[in-house]
């Protein structure tokens, strides 16, 4: 059974008439949308990074903040939306700026929970760059908490992962958190 057929079955089970005008192409559109929202499964870290790793003498913190995040929670298939802040201490290599955002997107476009997403991004940055330290903070609003369940409209979740020097060195961690406004 195709993804489109599954969506048709879901709509029917919900009590909808998939033959009514407004729903005629909905199963096809929903299948296409889900494939787009989960396209991270079709990507690898090597493909995303490509040749965008460059030699650098910089040993100071590199920070990319306010990267837009759109993901789906693995528990309810509902969106969580927010921003990601990524910082790392180079160790002879820096990553092309857009590649940091592409790494966020690759992992964000997979079904999962925010806590795991934070770690995946941090470990990928560490793996690719060989950084001395990596920090990732995600701030997101979860539709599974806002639209259903407890229905708390103003709630948000903050998760962080600190690796290497950003974990071991309080001054470096403080610099990172200060630069992202935390």
Image: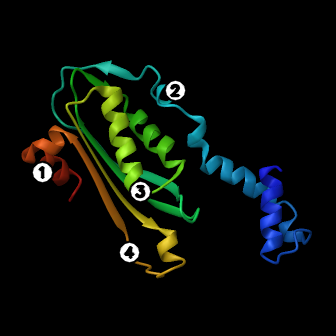
Q: Is residue 26 visible?
A: no
- Residue labelled with disc 1: 174
Left or right? Give the position of 85 relative to 169.
Answer: right
- Residue labelled with disc 4: 155
Give whichever of discs 4 and 2 has the lower sequence position: 2
Q: Alpha-carbon distance for marks 4 and 2?
A: 35 Å
Left or right? Give the position of 60 relative to 117.
Answer: left
Give whichever of discs 1 and 2 has the lower sequence position: 2
In terms of secondary structure, where does tag 4 sit? loop
Using a 10 Å C-alpha cutoff, classify the residue at mark 3 as few (fewer than 14 neighbours), some (14 to 19) or many (20 or more).
many
Left or right? Give the position of 104 relative to 91.
Answer: right
Q: In the rendered structure, find residue 47 and report the number of the disc placed on it.
A: 2
Using a 10 Å C-alpha cutoff, classify the residue at mark 2 as few (fewer than 14 neighbours), some (14 to 19) or many (20 or more).
few
The answer to whether 76 is drawn above or below residue 58 in the figure is below
Q: Position of residue 18 (x, y in %)?
A: 87, 68
Contact between marks 4 and 2 (CB within 8 A): the answer is no
Contact between marks 1 and 4 (CB within 8 A): the answer is no
Q: In the rendered structure, find residue 114 and report the number of the disc placed on it.
A: 3
Q: Alpha-carbon distance for marks 1 and 4?
A: 25 Å
Kindly identify the residue that appears in the image at 35 percent across and 66 percent down.
Answer: 157
């Amino acid at each position: 059974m195709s993804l489109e057929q599954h969506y048709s079955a879901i709509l029917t089970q919900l009590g909808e008439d998939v033959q009514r005008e407004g729903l005629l192409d909905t199963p096809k559109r929903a299948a296409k949308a889900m494939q787009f929202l989960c396209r991270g499964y079709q990507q690898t870290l090597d493909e995303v990074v490509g040749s965008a790793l460059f030699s650098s003498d910089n040993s100071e913190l590199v920070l990319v903040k306010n990267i837009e995040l759109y993901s789906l929670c693995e528990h309810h298939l509902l969106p969580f939306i927010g921003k990601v802040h990524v910082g790392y201490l180079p160790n002879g290599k820096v990553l092309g700026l857009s590649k940091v955002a592409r790494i966020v997107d690759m992992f964000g476009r997979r079904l999962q929970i925010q806590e795991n997403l934070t770690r995946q991004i941090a470990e990928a940055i560490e793996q690719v760059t060989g950084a001395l330290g990596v920090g990732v903070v995600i701030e997101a609003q979860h539709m599974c908490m806002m639209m259903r369940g407890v229905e708390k409209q103003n709630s948000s979740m903050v998760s962080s992962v600190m690796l290497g020097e950003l974990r071991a060195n309080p001054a470096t961690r403080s610099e990172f958190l200060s630069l992202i406004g935390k």
